[in-house]
Amino acid sequence: MMFTCFLKVYIISELKFKAVYRHIIIICFMITASEILPQSSYDPAGGMMNTGSGVFRYNSFESNPGNYTVNGDWEFSLLLGYENISENYSNVYFFSGAKRIGRNYFYARYSPGLKKKFSYSTGSTITLIDTLKVETSLTTGIEYSELFGFGYSFNLAENFSSGFSLRHLRQEINRDIVQPVISDTANYISTVTDSYHNNIWKTDIGLYYRVNEQIGVGFSTNNLALFSEADDPGTEDDLWLRNIKQARFRFDYTPLSNLDFRIIYESGGKVVAGGSYTMGKLTFNFNLLHDQAINPFPAAFSPGIYYSTGFLSLYITGIKYLPPATGPFNLEQYLNEGIDNLHNNRYSGDKLFFGANLSLSFIPKKKVEFIDVNIEKDIYPTLYDIYQNIPFATARVRNISGKSVSVKPSSIIEGINKERVYSPSVTIEPGDSAIIKFYTLVEEDYREKGRKISNARFFLSSLAENDDDIIKLPLLINDMNSWDGNVENLRYFVKYQFPETREIARKVLEADQTISGDIPPALNIFHQVKILHRFFISGKKYVSDPRAAVEKVQFPIETLELGGGDCDDLSVAFSALLESVGIQTAFVDYKPEGEGDVGHVNLLINTKLTPENISLITKNDKKYIIRGNVAGREEAWAPLELTVSGSFDDAWNDAAERFYREAISNLGLSKGTVRIVDVY
């Protein structure tokens, strides 16, 4: 009879217990909360970004959306904490390690203290028979923990990084239930613990873009992807963490190098706003926090102080909640609203954190970095040495160290240079930037045909064996006949084939018998010019250049073989014949004055005649100009137009008339519309 009554009472009690389970614990439970650490919304480091400032810190998932750092290639962090709650709690919150390899960043942390526990305790009376009542004590415990976290990011560009995080969350519910024990000698009530587990892999992505030196913006997700594995899916859903998909936005403003402000907003209604100020090795930080689930506004404030020596950083931060931000546990409210993170919620207590970060570099820490690089000139291979004096590229470079740095720039152009070409060193003061010019040298044996796109790599070095920063940019290499339009650079085409033109000029002069002993020695050069001109102009035709994106100049042998060319080609070829046998020449550059005008080039030839004996060839003072040589001796130069197909006198008269009209009468030499450019 007793057994039947007991079994009947137990079945009824168990059914009633399951039906009214939540109502019973609402009336009877007591809560203790302990072991709290951030999961999102709040960062114990105070939201300080780990992207190059002098203050090192651990790189958390909480406030670095791009998950990237430019600190040393190895980084280790330790975080200790104390929480003022019903049961004061302190713990090693987590230990993390990170490794940077080039633009790749890998991060992992082990977080034994990243957890939150709730404990529910109740007394319950169960009637076994009409007069026998049994007092039982049931306890339900809930624990949320995040033991492991992994992250990866890639620095897509100098000011843009993107990454993702992967974190393992474990949720566990341990609930006491009553269980009858029935035997021949005794019948009584015992309790057993029923456990439910839910393992979650949480994946989020983030990115951070530095608009300029003052403004940075970031975006990251919260609970973007959740891979859940539960013992009994759907069981105790009201007690699990609320995994609401959210977005997090960050805005940074740095008006001064030692002062910055930040705002972090979560779509769930959480806001962190604050700033920091650096004085030497010390940084002071302050944040205000708001959560729509926690009143009043602001819900809390968080101060922090940081000390950094470069490779070692120590900091103390804390968070103080304002009444009634913390309060007693309300199970009905908890079941309706829950919590969505392990740190900043209505059950949080005031906290104090102590952190240490060790940043190690087995490669020297970089001291300078590129801001940008601009290609100033395409490469014209025939003009092989002009880039020793004229930069083909310039760069803005910033000193990111705390000391004055001497920067040694260098570059290498694929297909042009066989090894690095070093440019002059530049000293940059701490925090300053400077313009650096890059020079190069085309190998004289470069003979490749055709235009092509190549790559130029630019290097900055503050040490003998290591590069602080490297940038690679595309660069146009023109073909051998391409010319930059600067008449001064036609001399490279003149002397490009000297051995060949010297042999041709020598044979022409040796074959001519018009020079005799009756000619005064002073006229030898003038007569050689006439002989070479007669050979050169025979069968030659003026042909204008076709319209093209780049100007072309024929080499002297090409012009002689083709039998024609434009004014540039003809002037270059005849200058090469004369210069190869020691007759000095100069280009006359007639620049276009108005829209639609076309520039022109012809020659001046040094006759070596003095003003006293110029009458040997002409009495017209408009047909020559007097120029002083390096020794101060005055010599007569005769203009010559190579596009005229007639006699030497025709070419001389045409060039002389043009020179007098444009250079003398129209003051072209004074105005700069006419220039005389010596080949040597």
Image (tube, rainbow, N blue to C red):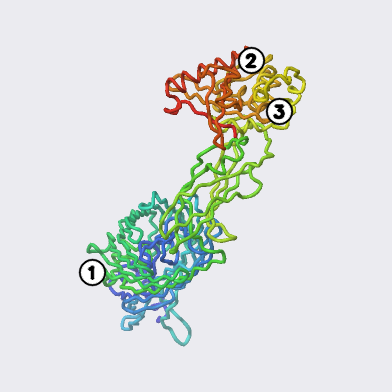
Identify which amino acid the numbered label 1 is placed on: Pro
Q: Quadrant of residue 191?
A: bottom left
Q: Nearer the viewer, residue 552 or 86?
A: 552
Identify which amino acid the numbered label 2 is placed on: Lys
Q: Residue at x 55, y 49 (%)?
A: 458
- Closer to the camera: disc 1 or disc 2? 2
- Quarter of the image with the N terminus in it: bottom left
Q: Is residue 627 above or below residue 227?
A: above
Earlier in the chain: of badge 3 and badge 1, it is: 1
Q: Which residue is mark 2?
A: 541
Circle 3 residues within 10 Å: few <14, some 14–19, many ≥20: many
Q: Is residue 225 above or below residue 301?
A: above
Could you say whether the residue bearing mark 2 is in a helix, strand or loop? Answer: strand
Q: Which residue is mark 3?
A: 501
Earlier in the chain: of badge 1 and badge 2, it is: 1
Earlier in the chain: of badge 3 and badge 2, it is: 3
- Residue 369 screen position, x and y as percent: 48, 54
Specify whether residue 664 is in view.
yes
Identify which amino acid the numbered label 3 is placed on: Thr
How far apart are the alpha carbons under marks 3 and 2?
A: 19 Å
- Closer to the camera: disc 3 or disc 2? 3
Could you say whether the residue bearing mark 1 is in a helix, strand or loop? Answer: loop
Q: Which residue is mark 1?
A: 324
- Quarter of the image with the C terminus in it: top right
Q: Is residue 439 above or below residue 50?
A: above
